[in-house]
């Protein structure tokens, strides 16, 4: 196989394989403090359960993959992302 024909394999709770026969890969970009003012506000206010709903809504709207980014100088990105990902792991329909 050439590198171009290798499938993209991602895993959360269930594996997602995007290969040569796949159509569009839909990436939800609203779980990103730099790309969503609403998500940024929820994170800065430590409202993580509501932030999980943002991710859930993206999956409900057809996202195959969620872009999660906590790169912001005003929050402890590592600690906050760790807490957020732990909450997401408890949500089988999102993880």
Image (cartoon, rainbow, N blue to C red):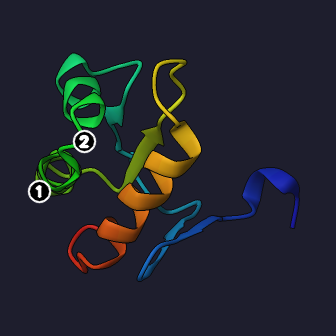
| Residue in the picture at 54% in, 18% down | 73
Which of the two residues, 48 or 37, is positioned nearer the viewer here?
A: 48
For label 2, the SS is loop
Left/right placement of residue 15 relative to residue 20 reads left
Mark nearer the viewer, 1 or 2: 2
Q: Is residue 79 above or below residue 76?
A: below
Q: Is residue 94 above or below residue 66?
A: below
Residue 68 is tagged as none
| Residue in the picture at 44% in, 43% down | 68
Q: Residue 55, how many percent across, how many down?
A: 23, 50
Residue 92 visible here: yes
Q: Is residue 37 above or below residue 23?
A: above
Left/right placement of residue 56 relative to residue 92 reads left
Quadrant for the N terminus in the image: bottom right
Q: Is residue 72 above or below residue 63?
A: above
Mark 2 burial class by Cα count in 10 Å: few <14, some 14-19, many 20+: some
Residue 95 visible here: no
Which of the two residues, 2 or 8, is positioned nearer the viewer here?
A: 8
Which of the two residues, 13 or 45, is positioned nearer the viewer here?
A: 45
Q: Which residue is mark 1?
A: 60
| Residue in the picture at 39% in, 45% down | 24
For label 1, the SS is helix
| Residue in the picture at 28% in, 36% down | 43
- The CA span between labels 1 and 2 is 23 Å
Q: Residue 8, how many percent across, how many down?
A: 63, 61
Residue 46 is tagged as 2
Mark 1 burial class by Cα count in 10 Å: few <14, some 14-19, many 20+: few
Q: Earlier in the sequence, mark 1 or mark 2?
A: 2
């Amino acid at each position: 196989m050439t590198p171009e024909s290798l499938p993209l394999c991602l895993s959360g709770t269930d594996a997602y394989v995007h290969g040569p026969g796949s159509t569009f890969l839909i990436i939800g970009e609203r779980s990103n403090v730099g790309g969503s003012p609403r998500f940024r506000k929820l994170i800065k206010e430590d409202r993580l359960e509501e932030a999980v709903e943002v991710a859930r809504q993206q999956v409900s709207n057809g996202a195959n993959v969620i872009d999660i980014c906590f790169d912001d100088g005003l929050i402890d990105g590592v600690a906050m992302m760790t807490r957020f990902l732990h909450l997401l792991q408890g949500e089988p329909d999102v993880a």
